[in-house]
Structures are given as structure tokens and as C-alpha cells.
């Protein structure tokens, strides 16, 4: 995967929120995301499938649940750095028009 393809996979707001949660909590199931993000389960499942197809997250079965985690420590670092940078420089992109 090249840089632009990676950024395209993570640039959706919901997908980035999912990755931020995984970066903090390491591993979560769909119900955890639904509860924490207050979004519908089909939407969360769709975004997790996209992230998994891109190779950004991985899953493992735990009983009837699928547990999701970031697939690579470098990706976790990237998410952390983007989050930190956006807080330090809040005026960079204040509207959705710039994206």
C-alpha cells in the first residue's frame, strides 16, 4: 500500500475514531465501538471491514465475538502522531471543505 492509499483508508471520520479507540484500548469488539462512538452497528461493521480489507486492522475470534486491533505498531504510532499534531495546531483544518 502506498501513502495516498493508506491516508484514503484512514481519512474517514468514523474510521479515524475507530483507530483512535484501538490505539488507546488495543483491542475492542463491535459492541464496544457502538457504545463508545454512539453509532449504529451496521455502520461500525462496514468501517471495520474497510479497515480490515486495507490491512490496517486485524481481527481474531473470541467465542462469538470478533476482537479488532491495529495490525501494526507503526500504524498505532501514526494515529497517535496525527491526533497529537491536530491538537497542537487546531487551526489547520477547521472545516470539512479543506478535505
Image (cartoon, grey):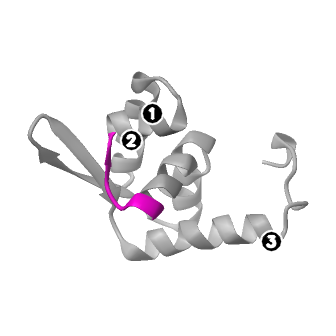
Identify the residue at image location x=44%, y=76%: 74
Left or right: 53 as drawn, with respect to 80: left
Relative to 38, is 84 above or below? below
Identify the residue at image location x=46%, y=27%: 43
Tell me, yes or no, whether the two marked residues, 1 and 3, touch with CB atoms within 8 Å: no
Q: CA distance from mark 1 to mark 3?
A: 28 Å
Percent from the top left, x then y, of residue 37? 53, 37
Q: Quadrant of residue 4?
A: bottom right
Check disc 3: other Cα within 10 Å, few if <14, some if 14-19, many if 20+.
Answer: few
Q: Which label number is shown at residue 88?
A: 3
Q: Earlier in the sequence, mark 1 or mark 2?
A: 1
Left or right: 28 as drawn, with respect to 21: left
Magenta stretch, residue numbers: 24-29
Which tag is nearer the camera, tag 1 or tag 2? 1
Percent from the top left, x then y, of residue 77? 51, 75
Check disc 1: other Cα within 10 Å, few if <14, some if 14-19, many if 20+.
Answer: few
Q: CA distance from mark 1 to mark 2?
A: 15 Å
Q: Earlier in the sequence, mark 1 or mark 3?
A: 1
Identify the residue at image location x=56%, y=40%: 14
Q: Which label number is shown at residue 48?
A: 2
Q: Which label number is shown at residue 35?
A: 1
Relative to 49, is 68 above or below? below
Q: Quadrant of the N terminus?
A: bottom left
Considering the numbered disc 3 on the image, is that residue within a helix, a strand or a loop? helix
Percent from the top left, x then y, of residue 91? 91, 60
Considering the numbered disc 2 on the image, is that residue within a helix, a strand or a loop? helix
Amino acid at each position: 500500500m502506498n501513502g495516498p492509499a493508506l491516508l484514503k483508508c484512514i481519512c474517514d471520520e468514523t474510521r479515524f475514531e475507530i483507530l483512535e479507540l484501538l490505539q488507546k484500548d488495543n483491542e475492542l469488539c463491535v459492541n464496544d465501538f457502538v457504545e463508545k462512538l454512539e453509532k449504529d452497528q451496521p455502520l461500525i461493521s462496514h468501517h471495520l471491514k474497510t479497515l480490515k480489507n486495507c490491512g490496517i486492522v486485524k481481527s481474531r475470534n473470541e467465542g462469538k465475538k470478533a476482537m479488532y486491533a491495529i495490525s501494526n505498531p507503526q500504524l498505532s504510532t501514526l494515529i497517535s502522531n496525527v491526533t497529537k499534531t491536530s491538537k497542537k495546531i487546531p487551526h489547520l483544518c477547521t472545516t470539512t471543505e479543506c478535505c
